[in-house]
Amino acid sequence: MPPFTLGPYTVSERLLSRDDMRAALAARDFGAAFRLMRKYDGASQDRIASGVEGLSQSRVSKIMRGEDRIATLDLIERITDALRIPGALLGLAPRPWEVIVTDARSRPTPSQAPARTAPAQLHNVEADQRDSVTLLNNDDTWTPHSTEELADLLGTDDGPPVHAANAARLAHEWLIVEPPQIIEIRAGRRIGTGLLHKVEGRVAHLRKLDDFIGGKDLNSLVERELTATIDLLRTASYDERLGRRLLSAIAELCQLAGWVAMDAGLPIPASRYFTGGVKAAHAANDQPVAANLISTLSYQVANQGEPADAVLLSHTAYQGARRTATATTLALLKERVAWAHAKVGELKNAEKALAEVDRLYEQRRPDDDPTWVYWLNEDEINIMKGRCYVELTKPRRAEPLLTNALKHYNDDHAREVALYETWLAEVHIQKGDIDQACAKATRALLLDARTNSTRSSERVQTLRAKLRPYADSHAVQEFEELYRSTIETSEHD
């Protein structure tokens, strides 16, 4: 008699109904999920790994101990399919093998049923996710109704919240949903290439203003431009080619609006702009712009305390654009991959991504680049390297990178210099040189007072908190006194 062998392991319905399992899956915490599989399903590390291509027993063991994380979308999908975890629980679109059961009348017959049927309550989970963020349309055409939906999304002050799970779902759908055909619109005056060129020029001009003006001052101006361009999409006449160019311009404006909103301390509108921008870029079939939006969203997610989700988003953005984007664009996307890994504390992965940034940037062909990557240069790349090393508590690697790059900036770029000085100040705190840290923190504080940027103000506040343990230092006391007087003056003004 042949030996008895177990079939492929799939997660039990009982375990999938547990709140702790659902929370682990929603956070993509596979270490917690695998531990729950062992505890409640009796699944060994071997059985968990056996059906998943590219996943070994030893890696499952490391993941369960918290020594490794699963961050690539490809492996997440393979685990989802092999273990029969419904896609909605991981922020993915329904998997090909899923059937969402809403009531008894819709239940498939045994001959029609797949190997696994998702629990009935998953229909509500899916609906909740669709209510929380407007995802890409699966329709074959972009119509005036599609424009109205986009306008509604971007114009709602208290619009739908975007969180890590549905942001990942949006990124996933961008990869798998075909761009719609844009029907010829005959609503009003005909758009010509001259007018579109002016629209695109205004977007580029506003982006350059962001080099010198803080988010709180620029936010309303960018919002007005976005509203006007959406109105043009709604009311003008254009063919498919010009329609895609107009949607691409809207997508770029959404990325800028989201970035400016982040700088103004408005994370909810920022995430809404990023979401709307992905929809517009998808309809325009502009993969590099969509990738930039998702990558910028990953940066926001990383800085809001969800770096593991940012790793997934940043990798998704890079993978989605690597066949169509220029080398400079890919270098920018890789920078955000490095930042996400640094925020997680993964030195090896961050350094690998930073090495890729250098390799890609060396291959740049500026004449081929989109206008929105104009600002990426060797100094900005070195600043990002330095910031990553500060996050990874490697001050001696960070210091020369930040110091040398800052020599090439003047106070006309007050916000950037203020931000970068805060990172150099943090280097000195990590080295124990408190006097130097206070000198850099003081310069950052004085420059921040000239800008209207929440990002730079929050970085100065972070430094203030990091200096508190050294309150006996005369330099710290002087910085604290200057901070209080500066804040009081700004509040009085």
Image (cartoon, grey):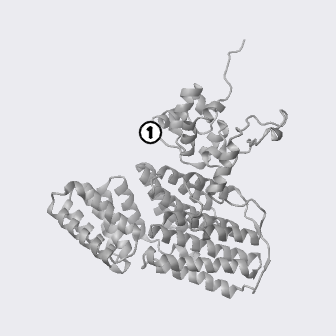
Q: Where residue 382 sits: x, y (%)?
A: 39, 65
Look at the picture and state if 20 lies above or below 6. Answer: below
Type of the residue with mark 1: Glu
Q: Quadrant of the N terminus?
A: top right
Can residue 312 be spotted in the picture? yes
Q: Where residue 286 sits: x, y (%)?
A: 65, 68
Q: Quadrant of the C terminus?
A: bottom left
- Packing grade of label 1 (10 A; few <14, some 14-19, many >=20) is few
Q: Which residue is mark 1?
A: 67
Look at the picture and state if 322 lies above or below 23. Answer: below
Q: Is residue 485 left or right of residue 454?
A: left
Q: Residue at x 74, y 43 (%)?
A: 100
Can residue 285 be spotted in the picture? no
Residue in front for this viewpoint, 350 or 447:
447
Q: Is residue 146 left or right of residue 415?
A: right
Look at the picture and state if 184 lies above or below 40. Answer: below
Q: Residue at x 66, y 37 (%)?
A: 82
